[in-house]
Image: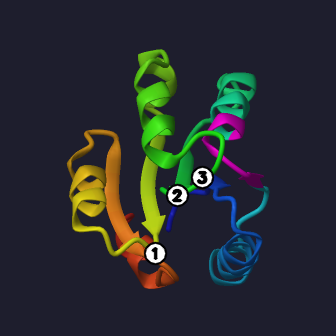
Amino acid sequence: MDFKPQFIIIDDNLIDQFVTKKLLKKGLDVNPLFIANNGKEGIEWLLKNSDNNESLIILLDIQMPIMNGFEFLDEFARLEEDVKEKIEIFVISSTLDTEEIKKAKENKYVSDFWNKPFRLDLLKSAFR
């Protein structure tokens, strides 16, 4: 990757957070890296930091308490265009539900859907 975007992991599973964080730090030298435990925390972080991000990659889980990934995407759609244009969202989930996978892939704000644990080469190839 020639550019250094910021990353935020939106996932309630502490093990998945840990694995993804290690993968990004070791494989892509990502720093800083932000973590939100659900979609609500993710939206709040975006609203608080929207003027700071030059480019941001969101790694979004689907199944979470308080606000799930689809509810997050609904709230994300309401954000200002100048905020949304700096953000790329990848849904990363362990769901086997074909309807959820289809719904995620068809969302206009989602760049791609990857199964957990995702492979670092997928992320790298998304920016070539």
Mark 3 vs 1, N-terminal side: 3
- Coloring basis for residues: rainbow
Q: Residues within 10 Å of mark 2 (few under 14, many from 20)?
A: some
Measured in 3D between alpha carbons, the distance from the residue under mark 2 to the one under mark 3, in whole angstroms, is 25 Å
**At x 49% / y 79%, what residue is drawn?**
116
User: Please, what secondary structure does the residue beneath circle 3 have?
Assistant: loop
Q: Residues within 10 Å of mark 3 (few under 14, many from 20)?
A: some
The amino acid beneath tag 3 is Pro
Q: Circle 2 is placed at which residue position?
A: 63
Measured in 3D between alpha carbons, the distance from the residue under mark 3 to the one under mark 1, in whole angstroms, is 25 Å
Q: Residues within 10 Å of mark 1 (few under 14, many from 20)?
A: some
**At x 34% / y 64%, what residue is drawn?**
113
State the image coordinates of residue 17 (x, y, percent, origin top left): 71, 69
State the image coordinates of residue 109 (x, y, percent, origin top left): 34, 40
Q: Circle 3 is placed at which residue position?
A: 5
Q: Is residue 85 above or below residue 98?
A: above
User: Please, what secondary structure does the residue beneath circle 2 have?
Assistant: loop
Give the extent of the magenta segment.
34-41
Q: Circle 1 is placed at which residue position?
A: 94
Residue 100 colored in magenta in the image: no
